Image (spheres, rainbow, N blue to C red):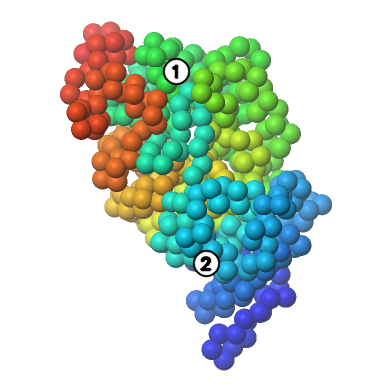
Amino acid sequence: MYAAIVGARRYAFADLKALLAKATPARSGDALAGVCAETGEERVAAQFALADLPLTTFLNEAVVPYEDDEVTRLIIDSHDKAAFGAVSHLTVGALRDFLLSDDATAPVLTALAPGLTPEMAAAVSKISRLQDLMVVAAKCSVVTRFRDTIGLPGRLSVRLQPNHPTDDARGIAASILDGLLLGSGDAVIGINPATDSPERTHALLSMLDEIRARLDIPTQACVLAHVTTTLDLIGKGSPVDLTFQSIAGTQAANKSFGIDLALLREAHDATLSLKRGTVGDNVMYFETGQGSALSANAHHGVDQQTLEARAYAVARAFRPLLVNTVVGFIGPEYLYDGKQITRAGLEDHFCGKLLGLPMGVDVCYTNHAEADQDDADALLALLTAAGVNFVMGVPGADDIMLGYQSTSFHDALAMRDLLQRRPAPEFEAWLGRQGLVDKASRIRPHTMPAHFRALLPPGET
């Protein structure tokens, strides 16, 4: 039992998961699940109680039972007690103060990451303002490598997302050409396939590999098929750079995705064995999003933001190249409007970075949400200032296959210019060799490189 007094009223919270849920800033998913605070005063009371909670509490009380959930077992069994020692005497509120202090430098936060559990990170985020989330995340440095180096200070990478509703090769090639000319693609050239058939996935992988090799692009390609499809294709010799999978924060939610930790481990080992990286061996790409466990009825009464942070424990077990939260994709049932999407995006980025993950964010919303492109522009700028590793590059910011709104190649270019961010160094050097960078080191495609014309359909210029 946890309690706090606000005004003349005493509020009590039955257990840790209730305390975390009641302390969470308002969002529609927690209201749908019936776990949110009933009033603003109750939320403040829960935040007071949470701020005074010793961090050691999270090692002694699980929000999802240890014996019932392999994600909980992963969190507890892999906890680095030596790293935790630096903050083991602190409360949640004192940890927030430390993270905001000058003592919490990038090396200190890197060393601390394995000592923090997802629930600790989620708890701190719940009592933090947006600027707190940004300031701390900006101090975290998480660098990963495959064919280029992602996450270095002062850099902003972009996933080039050339989706097509029928996986048409001409349409995909046109989108790739558009993105490359505008400096996108250093995080990954990644296609969400319209179908998950092995034949289609192999064809797309082969197409991407041919484009990458023909233009000698220092990046990686990925077709975001289910992990079992990719595993099968690895066995058949398909050109797989990265293995992708959506993940969640409970065993039951992951089961709804058709995965478990053993399968992810098998996929990681198989992809690593291909040795296709040139500057590093981070070979996994994970996507997450608040509300996925609730939509699978696999949330165990835990709030959606805490469960999102638990998904990051799954991700960091496999040393991924990329992790991104698709923050507004599930819809207004989980994040109702631009205000909730903004808060969730900054929370997710903060928690992921604090836990040692190479975080990107798909700044997005569905067409039936109470959000628009102004909300996306604002969140994109806040995340770039907070040091996000990568964002999405979608033609016109409108994904015509997935049917949602994201960020465009031009949006990423604007953020690089506005906040002095540059692409991954190997990719930036490649852009220079293509004549796509001007004397002021800005990406400015005045003419199309002659060899890029190989991507154009016959008869087009």
Task: Compare residues 285 and 422 and report the one nearer the observer.
Answer: 422
Query: Mark 1 and mark 2: span between their CA atoms?
Result: 46 Å
Which quadrant of the view contains residue 420? top left
Q: Position of residue 449 (x, y in %)?
A: 24, 15
In the rendered image, residue 167, in percent from the top left (x then y), is placed at 43, 22
Q: Is residue 294 visible?
A: no
Q: Residue furthest right?
A: 67
Mark 1 surroundings within 10 Å by alpha-carbon count, few (fewer than 14), some (14 through 19), many (20 or more): many
Amino acid on which the number 2 mark rests in the picture:
Asp
Q: Amino acid at mark 1?
A: Leu
Which disc is residue 289 wearing?
Answer: none
Q: Which residue is mark 2?
A: 97
Classify 27 as above or below 205: below
Q: Does residue 359 appear to the left or right of 419 in the view shown?
A: right
Report how many numbered discs are placed on residues in the image. Answer: 2
Counting other residues with Cα less than 10 Å from the Cα at mark 2, is it few (<14), some (14-19), or many (20 or more)?
Answer: some
- Secondary element under disc 1, as helix, strand or loop, is helix
Tell which tag, 1 or 2, sits nearer the viewer: 2
Q: Residue at x 37, y 41 (%)?
A: 154
Residue topped by disc 1: 208
449 or 458: nearer the viewer: 449
Instruction: Please say if 231 is above or below 292.
Output: above
Could you tell which of marks 1 and 2 lies nearer the N-terminus?
Answer: 2
Q: Residue furthest front?
A: 103
